[in-house]
Amino acid sequence: MTTLLLNIIKLMIYEIGQIISETITTSMILSILFKIIIASIILIATYLIGRYISHLLSRFLTRVEEDLRNRIIDISRYLIYAVGILIAIAILSPEPFTFSILILIVGLAVIVSLSDILRNWGSELYIRAVKPFHIGDWIEILGKNGRVVKTDSLGVLIETIDRERVYVPNSVIAREIVVNRTTPYGTIFRLRAEMSSDVDEIYVSEVLAKILGEIRGELVDEPKISYLGVFDGKSVFEIRLVLLNIRKIEDIIEFLNKRIREIWPDARVRI
């Protein structure tokens, strides 16, 4: 019985060999070898092009900070490698056209799924190149005021006057207006003083100027007071201050609230 099974297996192997030898012709073998050679040449060329582009970028981006320069070089090199590998696989594929369509669909799906991350990376490159602010600067974005405490590849972390931490993605920073309140002469703060709508704006401006005179030593220059109008039943005034020490802003707001409420109990000062 065992001998019979062995003979059957040998016969099957022989028949399979005959089928393969009849199916795979010499021209097919040469075609496969030719594809392998072409794909190998493309991979080698891709590697050399990637190295050349990296060297070229490192020479042209000498004025860019090292971390940003390395990130640009790495992304460029990996993109070149990815394109070369896809071309090589497409050449080796039995159905190049079908494979190309499949790769296109998969590529589009990956781009869509990673669109936010890719947008953040691109925005990070833009922000690092333009440098609209630095760590420690006081900025305003989307109505939020705060000090920049941390930056990374995805966004910026700011800390508000109330110790709230707000994380703003790089993509938002790149498309929105960012106001940097920090100048070489100090940090600019715009405070809002709100009180009853029936007050006399001229009188209020004079009182505010007198109160601000008590803290003149903390300010870089003369404060500016502007009447903005009535909003939600409240008269609103803007107080523009320039401070050298931004840590003083909390004490100043607390002082202004205390002094103003001695005259107008329902008044409030905030950023």
Image: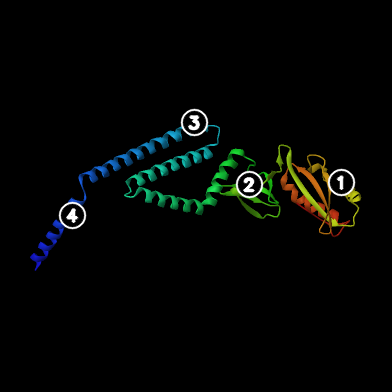
Q: Check whether the beta carbons of the residues at disc 1 and disc 4 lie within 8 A of each other.
A: no
Under mark 3, the amino acid is Arg
Residue toward you, 137 or 96: 96
- Choose top left, top right, bottom left or bottom right for residue 83: top left
Mark 3 vs mark 2: give the one in front: 2
User: Residue 175's mark?
Assistant: 2
The location of residue 123, given as percent across then percent down, is: 58, 45
Q: Secondary structure at mark 1?
A: helix
Q: Residues within 10 Å of mark 1 (few under 14, many from 20)?
A: some
The location of residue 99, given as percent across then percent down, is: 37, 50
For marks 3 and 1, give the CA distance.
Answer: 56 Å
Please tell me which of labels 3 and 4 falls first in the chain. Answer: 4
Return the residue at label 1. Answer: 209
Q: Check whether the beta carbons of the residues at disc 3 and disc 2 lie within 8 A of each other.
A: no
Under mark 4, the amino acid is Ile
Residue toward you, 117 or 185: 117
Residue occupying image coordinates x 10% and y 62%: 7
Return the residue at label 4. Answer: 19
Q: Check whether the beta carbons of the residues at disc 2 and disc 1 lie within 8 A of each other.
A: no
For marks 3 and 2, give the CA distance.
Answer: 30 Å
- Choose top left, top right, bottom left or bottom right for residue 86: top left
The location of residue 148, given as percent across then percent down, is: 64, 47
Q: Residues within 10 Å of mark 3 (few under 14, many from 20)?
A: few
Left or right relative to 207: residue 11: left
Please tell me which of labels 1 and 4 falls first in the chain. Answer: 4
Q: Secondary structure at mark 2?
A: helix
Please tell me which of labels 3 and 1 falls first in the chain. Answer: 3
For marks 1 and 4, give the CA distance.
Answer: 100 Å
For marks 2 and 4, give the CA distance.
Answer: 64 Å
Q: Secondary structure at mark 4?
A: helix
Return the residue at label 3. Answer: 59
**Looking at the image, how many numbered discs can be counted on the residues?**
4
